Amino acid sequence: MAPMHCALGMTMGFECIRRRGAAATFAAVASVLAAAGATCHAAESSAVDFSAVKDPLAAELLDVDDAFVFSSRLDGDRVVARWDIPKGYYLYRQHFELTGVDGVELGDLVIPPGRPHVDGFFGESEVYFGGVEVSAAILTRSASQATVRFRYQGCAEQGFCYPPTSKTASFVFASDAEATSPASAWYIVLLVVLAGLGISAMFIRRR
């Protein structure tokens, strides 16, 4: 997903504030208008192609999946999500959200403290540079598979904010039969031992 100039918060809308690039964009527009005026004497009848105006920062920004490299795993009965963040980008602490899907109920989200940060998008916030992990316990599930939706949002230090992003991951648990296999194995061993003792007793009686 390409970066956008406007982003929405988790519960309410915010307009992204451009901190850089405004002057460069204005210069590009002026250049196009000047070129159009030089080739046409009647300004009112001239058609200016604004598609020629390029965002001076668009080419410098990473795709959202490269700016916030997402991965997830199952750690016992907890779902763990991780984001690796390259230099120049950060994630907001208050915009993390994990939601269980199809009968999955999660416990409280555990998020480490972030770094205090102030920007023109969300004001005073806690953010993460470099990387961060969050987790939540799986309280209930109705099947051997648990599906969880992860939601997050971050920005680039260059002055752009990405829209909220969602990822969905499924985690497979051992089936009930597999979960009880250790006890079943001990039960089978006990039967074999008892059977062996019975056979030994039969041979002793025959002697």
Image (tube, helix red, strand yellow):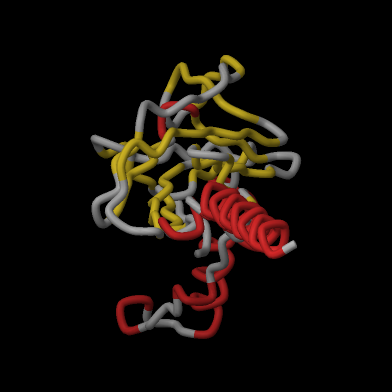
Judged left or right of residue 34, residue 130 is right
Q: To which quarter of the image does residue 195 belong?
A: bottom right
Q: Residue at x 58, y 66 (%)?
A: 31
Between residue 46 and residue 28, name the one nearer to us. Answer: 28
Q: To which quarter of the image does residue 130 belong?
A: top right
165 to 54, vertically: above or below: above
207 to 5, vertically: above or below: below
Between residue 128 and residue 124, name the one nearer to us. Answer: 128
Q: Residue at x 40, y 59 (%)?
A: 145
Q: Residue at x 35, y 30 (%)?
A: 107
55 to 33, vertically: above or below: above
Judged left or right of residue 24, residue 172 is left
Task: Work out whether residue 70 can be spotted.
Answer: no
193 to 98, vertically: above or below: below
In x, y percent, where is residue 144?
39, 59
In x, y percent, where is residue 37?
49, 75
In x, y percent, where is residue 23?
58, 46
Task: Work out whether residue 5 can be spotted.
Answer: yes
